[in-house]
Every structure is written in C-alpha cells, then in structure tokens.
Amino acid sequence: MTRVVCAQLAPVIGDLSANAGTSTAAVEAAAADGADLIVLPELVTSGYVFSSAAEARSLAIPPGSPLLADWGRAAGNATVVGGFCEAGDDGRVYNSAAVVDRSGVLAVYRKTHLWDAEGTAFSPGTAAPPVVETAAGRVGVLICYDMEFPEMTRGLALAGADVLAVPTNWPLMPRPDGERPGEVVTAMAAARANRVYLACCDRTGVERGQSWTEGTSIVDPDGWVLATAGPGVASIAVDVDLGAARRKTISDVNDVLADRRTDVYRQF
Amino acid sequence: MTRVVCAQLAPVIGDLSANAGTSTAAVEAAAADGADLIVLPELVTSGYVFSSAAEARSLAIPPGSPLLADWGRAAGNATVVGGFCEAGDDGRVYNSAAVVDRSGVLAVYRKTHLWDAEGTAFSPGTAAPPVVETAAGRVGVLICYDMEFPEMTRGLALAGADVLAVPTNWPLMPRPDGERPGEVVTAMAAARANRVYLACCDRTGVERGQSWTEGTSIVDPDGWVLATAGPGVASIAVDVDLGAARRKTISDVNDVLADRRTDVYRQF
C-alpha cells in the first residue's frame, strides 16, 4: 500500500522563511506518519495574492533553492509534490510545482493554464506536465486550474500516471447546499474517466481578503472521494493500492483508455 | 426560456408497438406541458437486453420508420432526441439516436463507444456526433457510454452545442451512501468544463434481470444538477436559458474553451 498525504497548509503571503518552515515541518510530520507521497498546496513557498508582479518576482526561487532540497531531506523515503513561485532560468516568473525526494528535485512543472490575475505575475508554461517515476509510483503533476481541462488529466493518464498530484489554491466559490465543490466534482470525474487516483491539495487561511475552498481531496479510480479535508483541517491521509490505477478495465470488454475512438475525435 | 423534458420511460423488450405507443404518448404529454426539447432513453423503441444479435436485428427500424415521424408529429413545436435500434442502410444494426421535429428526422447519430455485450448486437458508429440547429437551440447528441469520454463532450462544445442530449440506459452500479451515480458526476464535470447543459435521459423498469440507475438528470453550465429523477419517476422538466451556454467566461480573463492549450496537449 501507498500512503498519500495532502497537507492543507496556510502559507503567509510574502514570508519565504515562515513558509519554508511550515511546509518542511509538514513534510517531516507526514514522513514520520509513514507517508509515501506528500502533496503540498500551490505556491506554498510564497502565498498567492500578490499585490504586484514585482512582489511575485521578489518571492521567486530557482529549482535549485535549498528550500526544495529541504523538502526532499525531510521526506525520508517519501516523494513530495509542492507548489512554488519559480524564478526561471530564462528570467521569467512561473507558478510551478516541484517533484522532490531525498535525491533532490526530480522534475519541475510550470502551470500552463493561468487563472484570473495570475497572468500579471506569471508567464504560462509551455511544456506538458510530467509523469515522474518515483518510489511511490508514477506521479503526474497539475496545478489548480490545469485540472479543469480534461485534455490534461487524460493526457497524464495516457502517459501512464497512477496518481495525479494537484497542488491548488481554490478560491472559495458559492455552491448549492449539500454539493461538493465543483473542483472536487471535476476531480471525481477525471478519476473515473481515466481510472487514476487524484490527490488535490488545497490551502487554508484567508489571504488579503481571499478565502479558500479548503477542499483538499483524495479520489480513487472509481471516482469516489476517499478523504476530504474541509475548513481548518491541516492534513488528510489515505492508504491506497496504486496498482489499481494500472487496471483500466470496467467490464468484460471495456477499458477506459483502449475504448477511445481517436478516429471519431479527429472529426470534431 | 427553453423547457427541457426527460421522459424516464420503461420500454418493454421486444415490443415495438407498445414502445411506440409509450414513447409517442410521453412526447405528446411533454409537448402539452410546453416542452421545447424532449429527451427519451437509449433504445426506447426496442428495449436493451437482447438475447441475441438476431433479436436485436428483428427489432431494428430504419430512420424512415413511421415511429420516428410520429415522435415529430406528437412534439408540436418541440424537438425530440430519442434512442432507437437502427436498421442501417448498409445492412448493419446500430444503437442510434434520432433528432426529430414536426418536419421529420433532422439527424441520426450512431453510438461509437459500445458498452459490454453491445458489440455482439451492434456495429459501432464511425461518425462524430452531430450538433443540430433546432427550434430549441443547438443540440449535441451522445448515447450513454459515449458521455464517459471527455473527448466527446468537449468536441460537441467546441462544435457549438448549447445542450447535450444523452439518451442512456445506465445499468445500476453500487455507489457509496449519499453519492450521486458516477455517470451524473461525469455529466456535472462535463457541463462545467464546457459550460453547456446536459440532459441525460435514463430508463426505468427491470429488464431480463437488469436494473437501471434511474438517474435521469438535467445539469446546468455551472455543473449543478437542476433536476434529477430517481426510482420510478416518469419525467423531469426544467426551464433554462440556453443562451447561458454561449457565454464561456468564468472570470475577468478566463474562458473555458479559449483557455485551452492545444500546443501543450499535442505534446502528450
């Protein structure tokens, strides 16, 4: 079994040092609890609601930053996927996620679908998200609004991901009584369409007037929510058989990936 | 406003005459209630659980059948989308849906993704589903398992559909207490990913030991269920502004279709 942990943290806007401490401590605690895969929120190093592009740039760190290496060291045998404000080697600033273990940074993904005002602070990424072979299985990475595009979840499943690790900052939106957040509905549908796990790690706290959904959720390949956080909950953990994501059959003859009809899709 | 009605009928396996009567009466009743778009279940003319390919063939009708024309006549000003067992002009048998109004058959779509044993009775379709300009708006058509493929719902949205009419026969599957059927979760996610309406018309009754989900649901472009049927409910109706499906914006700068990154998707 693989223990998946999402740490629904509350980063402090602008305080790199405090956020490094909070996130590294959360990784350490999850590892002590037996975690194999630890997901942290989007932009957990910096906070999210920047007052200007200059503020975002001032908080950007390169993938070689000691902060990310510290996550890997704190993780023990686990793999960490966490969001950070990236100072790109091309001089641009990206909303990125790093996949890290004790050996160092395994991959960096730059968010390609930017939400709302993010475009004023960040350049969009131009590369498809990776599927990383880790000690915890094959981990695909998306960031927040990326997940809303079925092309992305499908693409990662076709590329062999067992689990999609999704650092997010979901701004709180109205929803009907009794309904799950819309983003969680999307995660459930993506899971069942592709028979993969999703581990979406939202944040908590109120930042410059912005509240968050606090909807951190881990979803299984049948599309059911195994665990969900809710307001104020600091972390969730589940033990899953990641191998289930490699079985795509759903009846005697049906297979959710093999049944695709690309000959038909090309006609749209 | 557009009134959308889904008639969750119980066709009788093998009884073309009885099913013609039941379905035409349901269309007539919906029209009398002010319906603009009426959706009927998959294979409502024939029933679903065939004992053999020969039985399916014996129940197949061509698109020129008086039965489909009768739906159109009974519909008044409304448009009907209903499933039928099609005798193709190529000698094959298809699991199809017709779009019909008082002027006749506007389009026929042949299910492309066949579920479980369907392949023994039906040939899969080879053409993308249509988006039909109707008096009730732009109607895209899918049949049951087709909807589970995000390529299909996305494709119809890109082709301009306001509403996806989905005749279905959802076999009853286990689900956790308090959860909606997985197919409804998928419909909700497809609606919000594409900002379209979905009108999924399931069936009721027990046929040769097979029970159905009875999960008929109409979903809005925010992904919320406007109405859902449940066991034994004969029909649901909602009045919607189909124009809402032509507004794809979800923030000051975001648009669910314009934000697609085909340059990235091509890299998978």
Image: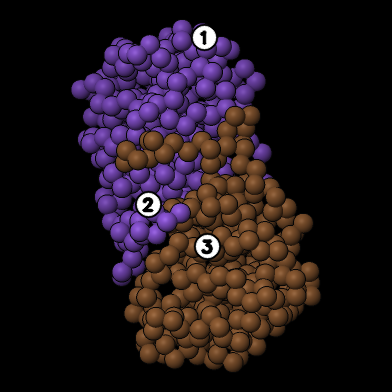
Chain colours: A brown, B purple
Question: Looking at the image, is B40 positioned above or below residue A225?
Answer: above
Residue bearing the label numbered 3: A130
Q: Residue at x 28, y 17 (%)?
A: B69
Residue B254 lies left or right of residue B183; in this view the side is left
Label 2 element class: helix
Q: Amino acid at mark 2?
A: Asn
Q: Nearer the viewer, mark 3 or mark 2?
A: 3
Residue bearing the label numbered 2: B194
Label 1 element class: helix
Q: Amino acid at mark 1?
A: Glu
Which chain does the numbered disc 3 sit on? A
Q: Residue at x 56, y 11 (%)?
A: B52
Confirm whether residue B96 shows in the render. Answer: yes
Label 1 vs label 3: CA separation? 49 Å
Question: Looking at the image, is A54 positioned above or below residue B61?
Answer: below
Q: Residue at x 23, y 34 (%)?
A: B134
Marker disc for residue B55: 1
Q: Quadrant of the N terminus of chain B?
A: top left
Counting the numbered discs, the total is 3
Residue A7 placement (x, y as % from top left): 65, 73
